[in-house]
Amino acid sequence: MKYWLLLAAVVILVAGVALQSRKEQATTSSSLPPPPLKSKSVKQLIDSLREIQGEFTDAYYMTEGRGFLPANEQSDFLDDNGKDLQPVPDALKALIARGVDSLPELMDHLVDHRLTQLHTGGYFSDRYDPRYSDPARQPQGLNQVDMNSHRSPNEHPYTVTVGDLCYVAIGQIVNRGLESIPHAHIGPLGGAILPPAINSPTQNHKLAEAVRKDWGGLTKDEHFHSLMDDLTTGDIGRHPMAAERLLYYYPERSTGFLVHLLQRKLYPYAYEMRLSETVERILQMVNESDRKAAIMKFQHDDRMLASCLPAEFARRIESAETDEIFRAGTHQKELTAEDRNGIMQSNRAKEVFADAYPNIDFRHPPPGEGVIPEVQSYLVSALATVANDRIRDVVLKRLLELDPEKGDVDFRLGKDQFACSAARMLAGFGHDDECLKYFDARIKFQEEHGVDDGRQDFLSWLKRWRAVFSHKGTLPDHSPQD
């Protein structure tokens, strides 16, 4: 549970926007690039990247691409010292906003050595986030640099190139972490802070070749389906980001499915444990007939939770593949007992999945009918800045359905997290009285029965939103946990 709450703080921060302008926001699901740039060609926008200025954290922010840049205001993003980061320039946002139409020329400029005015430093690396989770389909010869062998805080002073920003823009469009300069990271076992990795396609042409191999010639239909795959399969961290891009680029095609996801039943965190334990028990069964009987009984006992089984099996399989990629990136030469057990469990899960669900690809399991509220809150947070009326209507309905007293402490806190994400989406759109009901009821419950799990930060967060909807407070920018 603590993991979910920690991740929640990050998601809420990244999803933060200048909500005071919401009342003037259009109800369509995406916005055009800034008007002064509408007449500029993609090539002219790329040429404009040379004018981008900044130092250190500005460079990290712009080249790491936190958040979906066209949809988020930068005023809510701070550096490690609490200072505002420099806004992402309109030229970069406009290139990303145009989506697939920008890709051909962005690909052509991946090795563009022209210098920007963004200055930083670090060590040269080859970290790459591939299109496909299947290792057999991934570009070879990357993720080979050992990140743990670098200790100097500024091994190479570096000026970001136009090609580096084109690399970032492509990653933003296709929902991949093509990060020219990720933040400095912690060394093994909590050791020293290591310098940032410079993943530059102008310095390492293999990165440019990998991008072209994975994404060259991408059509809008292929882009849509790639984002749909990201939304429903693989790394759960990509799901909200894929949803945001789908609604931004393809509102007419994606709204119906996103509404379906938002309508999933919220279940307690304990159900997640029950689901995991059920999969573990099935994996231990030797006979196929016993496994099928167990799955059928689970479906009879709890149809909603049983609908989540295929995705849970798939997570077991893909977790082992992700670990394998990480070991390659850190040059881990020997497998630990935990590694060997993970690989064995993954292979076993593949066999069981194939027997139990012969008509389903484990890389594309259908979404279940239920979800824990923490995960649903990430989806709502991601959609907050691009939501249309239909999305807001279903989120409002789900908020009004929440029982402020029902469930254990973890479930109630999870519902609070969902409510705060919903509040970000709904603030300024005429739903104040309806939203106020939940926050009033939750605060009253805790005043009468004690603060849930001692989480004064969550209670403070609820009170701040109550003040917003009762017109007695300003809109919160950040979580009290930050």
Image: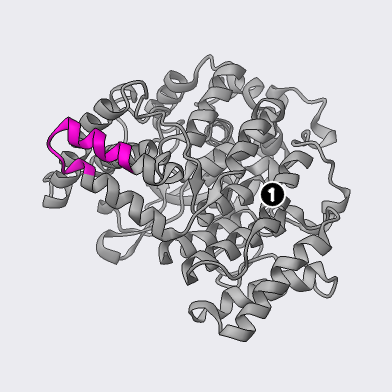
- Residue 145: horizontal and vertical position, in percent? 28, 41
Front residue (pair 429, 111) = 429
Overall secondary structure of the magenta section = helix
Q: Amino acid at mark 1?
A: Val
Check if residue 429 falls in the magenta segment: no
Work out whether 119 lies above or below 411.
above
Left or right: 232 as drawn, with respect to 126: right
Check if residue 296 falls in the magenta segment: yes
| Element under disc 1 | helix
- Residue 254: horizontal and vertical position, in percent? 64, 30
- Residue 323: horizontal and vertical position, in percent? 27, 43
Q: Where does label 1 land, which residue?
A: 395
Q: Quadrant of residue 355?
A: top left
Q: Magenta segment range?
A: 282-297
Q: Quadrant of residue 270?
A: bottom left
Work out whether 454 lies above or below 136.
below
Judge the density around disc 1: few (<14), some (14-19), many (≥20) Cα neighbours within 10 Å. many
Quadrant of image for the N terminus: bottom left
- Residue 425: horizontal and vertical position, in percent? 72, 52
Work out whether 384 lies above or below 78.
above
Left or right: 474 as drawn, with respect to 328: right
| Residue shown at the point (48%, 64%) measured from the top left | 5
Can residue 318 be seen in the rendering of this structure?
no
Can residue 470 be seen in the rendering of this structure?
yes
| Residue shown at the point (37%, 52%) measured from the top left | 155
